[in-house]
Amino acid sequence: MTVAATLQILADPVRAAILERLATESLCVCHLQDELGAKQTLVSHHLRALREAGLVLAEPCGRFTYYRLAPGAFDEVRDSVAGLAAASAADVPRRPC
């Protein structure tokens, strides 16, 4: 997945909220419903998009499925944004006209 595509996935407020919560612990849909105050269908829809993008992993546990961040899924985005942040702080040359 490209950096731009990942950023597009992250731009959705519900998906961003899900990822923020999964950054601290593995959660199931019922936990995310409670924390977000969202309906099960909405949470499941966004989790599916996050899984298909390779950003989260699903781990079955009995009758529940727990979700967690996929290891390394954000490395390319981190590196790209860090490069932009460093460039924004640098004194770059001006191209003559």
Image (cartoon, rainbow, N blue to C red):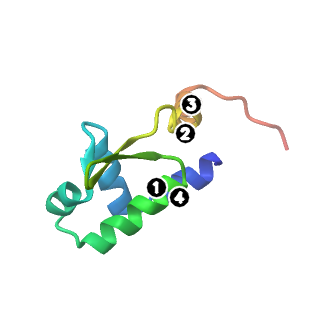
Quadrant of residue 38 within the rendered picture: bottom left
Which label number is shown at residue 63?
Answer: none
Read off the residue under disc 2.
Answer: 77
Q: How many marks?
A: 4
Q: Is residue 12 above or below residue 61?
A: below
Secondary element at image label 3? helix
Q: CA distance from mark 3 to mark 2?
A: 5 Å
The one of 51 and 4 positioned closer to us in this rendering: 51
Q: Dot 2 lies on which element?
A: helix
Q: Picture coordinates of residue 51 (x, y %)?
A: 48, 53
- Camera-side residue of 51 and 24: 51
Amino acid type, mark 1: Leu
> Real-space Cα distance between discs 1 and 2?
15 Å
Label for residue 8? 4
For mark 3, what is the residue? 79
Give the residue pinned by disc 1. Answer: 50
Q: Secondary structure at mark 1?
A: helix
- Residue 14 is left or right of residue 54, and the answer is left
Q: Mark 3 touching mark 2, by CB under 8 A?
A: yes
Q: Earlier in the sequence, mark 1 or mark 4?
A: 4
Q: Could you classify mark 2 by the number of other residues whose Cα lies within 10 Å: few (under 14), some (14-19), or many (20 or more)?
A: some
